[in-house]
Amino acid sequence: MCNTISIESEKGFFSDAINAVKARTADLALKYFIETYGCQMNEHDSEKLAGMLRECGYTKAETKKDADLILFNTCCVREHAEKRTFGNVGFVKELKAENPRLILGVCGCMMQQKDVAKRLFDRFPFVDLVFGTHELKNFPEMLLKALEEKRVFQISESDGEVIEGLPVERVEGFSTFVNIMYGCNNFCTYCIVPYVRGRERSRKAEDIVNEVREVVSSGYKEITLLGQNVNSYSSDGLDFPALLRLVCREVPELKRLRFMTSHPKDLSDGLIQAMSELDNLCKHIHLPVQSGSDRILKAMNRKYTSGAYLELVDKLRSAVANVEITTDIIVGFPGETDEDFEATCELVRRVGYSNAYTFAYSPRGGTIAARMENQIPEDEKKRRLNTLNAVLAETIPSNNDKYIGFEGEILVEGVDHRGDPLLFGKLSNFKMVYVEGDEKLIGTFVPVKVDGYRFNSLFGHIIDG
Ligand code: 5AD
Ligand code: SF4
């Protein structure tokens, strides 16, 4: 059972620190700038940091130059994250010379790797604050210390708790995120996430429903429930499909409920049934396959075969009308042969994804795969990535023919000004549709009919609802 800490019931340490920051910074009109790298989980953490800063009296700066506090919320999941972060942090030194009251903080997944965090803290003496992923609730207290000109380095090894009641400053718009769980227990051999985000812990359903209700009443029209593996959600006897049913029942005014990410090994018949039955649950699933080779899937510790994955895809397609599937794929995992790679291309052709995020395998310190023999040379990984992207460039559009004449509803997100201005928005199944129309429609649901497509986007016109 995980430990839930409520900021409400433990107001002391939290609000005392906020009040102390406020008292210290009153009349200074301080501004903050947060630069976020990586996934939605990090973006949402940044919204919580922004929420705490709002409570402390800070407002948002338009640029780093205008800021009195700059926070880098880092990611370490892929590629040259470390080099890039060190470069970006180094660059801020100049701004510190211009604004002596500027505080610089670095947080997020990369800082949960203690050796990397220590190296950064030692290399850049002008960095005031370094903290890990489990320290969000202590942020006001750490900020206070930084304002007192103390350097702060705070990284706890705990597996993390569930913290309820942190203030959130959401990015403006119509679509937002709600966490349902934190951490991951899966230890896919290439992945750093379980090491930097701790073990799986689910929020109580009641807290999730209350947050969804609050977010909807403040005007958001679409919510994505977030977790590293939402299919293993479990709290007070409720599993993930039960949670989805509960949210749809308790907050019927929410027209679009999404979720991500789903691990194929845990995708249940119950979820497929919920997707087919609940009108407000979107008909899209992000289902990372990672590889089409059973040998590589085993070495990745994914715990499913390509055959089992394809069976899931078939089940989804036959049960959920118009469902679209997107995925993540890694090429060049240690020991991947041409034959293994060809199996991945074959699976991609067979599934017919509506979109895919493709990555060259990148060794992450501390993971099992980083220590495996037969690492693939960089140029070969690049070649495979290009080949796979070419396969996707062929298969994604060929999946679009079925949309000609299709009628559905989009949530208008904005106007695309490349060429003649066109409104754009997504169907429930995550396909993007472009139509002519009035800007006033932004943020509303609009019925459309599809007339054509280009790569993974559809083009159409507005019809009478
Ligand atoms: N190398 C390349 N891609 C990775 N991913 C995670 N770890 C690595 C790594 N070491 C990809 C996976 C995952 C997505 C979020 O990032 O495809 O699904
Ligand atoms: Fe990483 Fe695997 Fe967990 Fe996803 S399920 S976060 S890939 S360990």
Image (cartoon, grey):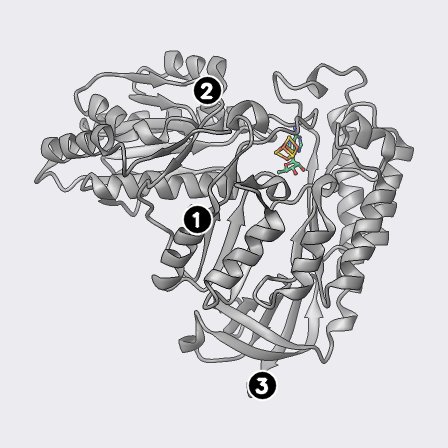
State which mark lies toward you, 2 or 3: 2
**Rendering quadrant holding ligand 1:** top right
- Seen as rendered, the residue at the extreme right is 339
Q: Distance of mark 1 from mark 2, alpha carbons?
A: 25 Å
Quadrant showing the C terminus: bottom right
Reply above or below: 155 against 429: above
Q: Residue at x 72, y 67 (%)?
A: 322
> Quarter-wise, where is residue 276 in the image?
bottom right
Q: Distance of mark 1 from mark 3, alpha carbons?
A: 39 Å
Q: Badge 3, how many Cα within 10 Å: few under 14, some, many 20+? A: few
- Seen as rendered, the residue at the extreme bottom is 464
Q: Is 178 on the left or on the right of 188, as rendered? A: left
> Which residue type does callout 2 highlight?
Ser
Beta carbon at label 3 within 8 Å of ligand 1: no
Q: Which mark is residue 158?
A: 2
Q: Which mark is residue 206?
A: 1
Residue 66 seen in render? no
Reply above or below: 72 against 219: above
